[in-house]
Image (cartoon, grey):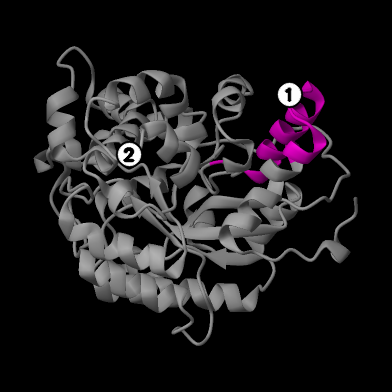
Amino acid sequence: MPSSNAFTAAPSLIRPALSLAASWPARLFRSSALLTESPPPYPLSKSTRPIITLEEHFLSRVANAHLNSRNEAFKFMPGLYDRFLELGPKRLADMDAGHVTMQVISHGPGDLSAAQCRECNDQLAEAVRSHPGRFAGFAELPMHAPKEAARELRRTCSGQNGGLKFVGALVDNHTDDGLYYDGPEFDALWAEAVKLDVPIYIHPTWPSEQLFAAYKSPQLTEDVNLSILAFGFGWHSDVAVHIIRLYAAGVFDRFPGLKIIIGHMGEMIPYMLQRIDRNSSQWGMERSFREVWDNNLWLTTSGNWSLDPLACILRNTKHDRIMYSVDYPFSRSPVGLKWLEELEGSGMVTEEELEGIRWKNAADLLGLHVNLASQVA
């Protein structure tokens, strides 16, 4: 996939996997329920108990100035691009409408250079300083350069940036050219994350050229192929495969204190957990996959507004590993609030478990402080 440099090729010459702005027509964005959710027309809950969300994105000034084709495509989504760029009143208004106490904000998809990551993170740090108690930050890292990524994680999470500490990093599931993170060159990053005691959130991203070529169907249009390989299914299963690769490569054996977050109800792993654990027992790892799942991995709900997948997760995942998220601006906080209300009324969780999902689990993992005195029970 292209770098974050400006994309100038004519649409007719852009290869299918790299041309979301050209080959993914506006009609797909306008029709996608995932990407164009609007706040629902129902009265909101009066409860103002704390809520923390942590898969919430923005597009930095530096990325906007060097726009790649994937992020250019976001302009097709009515009203979304302005929300994507903004770190102020619009975001806060959406949070207030969904009773979100604090957002942990991260950058959108696509590779940035080390210098661009610093600029991006400095912009986010300004927003966090401007809205203490409402915003926290996940760092953007140059994952194509693992040692630089480790240095930027240290700069942003150790207080070197004017005393402000981010609470971890959120990274794309692979680089634009399809590099995953199971190689030994990434040990520098994992070691730094363990030393700092901060999690790395591995987030889906657009399919690489290799993935698109391997899985595209000649029977389908390019926009349908891309949808299947992205938010329709593929980028979720791709994160699951990546987590299993990290396990098989011994990353969790070398770094038993490593903390990894994955989104979207566990990126399909909970539904295959027993089978993954059974088959991976033949691979010679020091710990079972189930041990790693219980001790090294956390998951968020992030835009999956159904109780069905949560029913599975509640049966096979430690409840203190489950965290609520919205996936702003691709989803909206009032939509998530409605899901929380449905969960509360379902009887699936106790009050203590519900509060854990709403905010306590995230606060414990990330070391976030919520002013309970300002909350009404």
Residue 143 in view, yes or no: no
Badge 2 marks a residue whose secondary structure is helix
Q: Is residue 364 rendered to the left or right of residue 186?
A: right
- Identify the residue position indicated by label 2 in the image: 243
Badge 1 marks a residue whose secondary structure is loop
Residue 174 in view, yes or no: yes
Q: In terms of depth relative to the viewer, which is nearer, 326 or 290?
A: 290
Task: Classify mark 1: residues with Cα within 10 Å, few (<14), some (14-19) or many (20+).
Answer: some
Q: Earlier in the sequence, mark 2 or mark 1?
A: 2
> Horizontal and vertical percent for residue 195?
40, 69
Does 352 appear in magenta? Answer: yes
Amino acid type at mark 2: Ile
Q: Which residues are magenta?
A: 331-354
Q: Measured along the vertical axis of the image, is residue 248 above or below residue 153? A: above
Q: Is residue 156 rendered to the left or right of residue 180?
A: right
Task: Classify mark 2: residues with Cα within 10 Å, few (<14), some (14-19) or many (20+).
Answer: many
Could you say which disc has been placed on residue 336 in the image? none
Q: Magenta part mainly helix, strand or loop?
A: helix
> Horizontal and vertical percent for residue 29?
42, 34
Q: Is residue 148 rendered to the left or right of residue 52?
A: left
Question: Residue sitting at 57 percent across and 42 percent down?
Answer: 321
- Identify the residue position indicated by label 1 in the image: 348
Does 242 appear in magenta? Answer: no
> Horizontal and vertical percent for residue 307?
64, 23
Dividing the picture into quadrants, the one containing residue 44 is: top right
Amino acid type at mark 1: Met
